[in-house]
Image: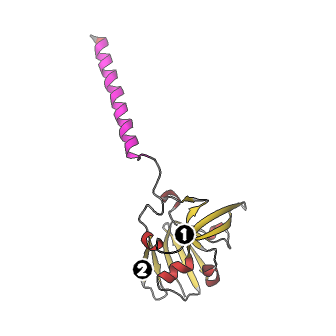
């Protein structure tokens, strides 16, 4: 009788562990992969010099032409990595928001990290909002949209862009 009771308890524990494991895995999603820039809804606030703002969304991005850029990313430790990016020119994003004149533009990440860029950098044919890195779409884990600035070191590249602001 004691043995039967022990077996029933053990069977119940095994079933419970199985159900908890199944529930955990189901909650993690079927692929474990986060949404990409074209699958997820996202928006970036664009502010002009007068303080007026508009939203630039994934739908707006889909209407603009993509550019291919080869860039060398210089990391904090001085190492360099060659990357192939595909995205939208920052100057075209501003133009789509009705902004054509600026001398300084700031880009800010969702975590508050912010950098400023002069007009020459903004208008550079390599300065893009990147969506694809080395042929693969970047994911939500990577920030969905990254400012790629090949003419500058990695500290000027901004992941998970939240705001683009024309300062003057």
| Mark 2 vs 1, N-terminal side | 2
Residue found 56% across the figure and 63% down from its top: 132
Up/down of 128 relative to 32, above or below: below
Disc 1, SS: loop
Judge whether residue 10 is colored magenta.
yes
Residue 135 coordinates in the image, percent (x, y)? 59, 59
Residue found 64% across the figure and 63% down from its top: 84
Residue 14 coordinates in the image, percent (x, y)? 36, 26
Q: In what quadrant of the picture does the C terminus appear?
A: bottom right
Residue 108 coordinates in the image, percent (x, y)? 52, 72
Residue span colored magenta: 3-30
Q: Residues within 10 Å of mark 2 (few under 14, many from 20)?
A: few
Q: Is residue 62 left or right of residue 78?
A: left
What separation in Å lies between label 2 and label 1 (alpha carbons)? 20 Å
**Disc assigned to residue 113:** 1
**Disc assigned to residue 54:** 2
Residue found 43% across the figure and 67% down from its top: 42
Disc 2, SS: strand
Judge whether residue 102 is colored magenta.
no
Front-most of 72 and 117? 72
Residue 112 coordinates in the image, percent (x, y)? 51, 69
Residue found 32% across the figure and 17% down from its top: 7
- Secondary structure mainly formed by the magenta segment: helix
Q: Residues within 10 Å of mark 1 (few under 14, many from 20)?
A: some
Front-most of 109 and 130? 130
Up/down of 14 relative to 147, above or below: above
């Amino acid at each position: 009788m004691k043995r039967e009771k022990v077996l029933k308890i053990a069977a119940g524990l095994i079933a419970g562990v199985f159900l908890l494991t199944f529930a955990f895995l189901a909650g993690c999603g079927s692929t474990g992969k986060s949404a990409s820039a074209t699958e997820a809804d996202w928006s970036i606030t664009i502010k002009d010099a007068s303080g007026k703002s508009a939203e630039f969304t994934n739908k707006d991005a889909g209407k603009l032409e993509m550019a291919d850029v080869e860039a060398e990313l210089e990391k904090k430790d001085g190492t360099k990595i060659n990357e192939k990016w595909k995205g939208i020119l920052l100057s075209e994003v501003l133009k789509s928001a009705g902004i054509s004149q600026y001398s300084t533009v700031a880009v800010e990440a969702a975590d508050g990290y912010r950098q400023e860029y002069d007009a020459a950098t903004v208008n550079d044919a390599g300065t893009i909002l990147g969506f694809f890195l080395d042929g693969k779409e970047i994911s939500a884990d990577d920030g969905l949209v990254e400012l790629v600035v090949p003419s500058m070191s990695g500290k000027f590249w901004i992941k998970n862009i939240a705001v683009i602001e024309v300062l003057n």
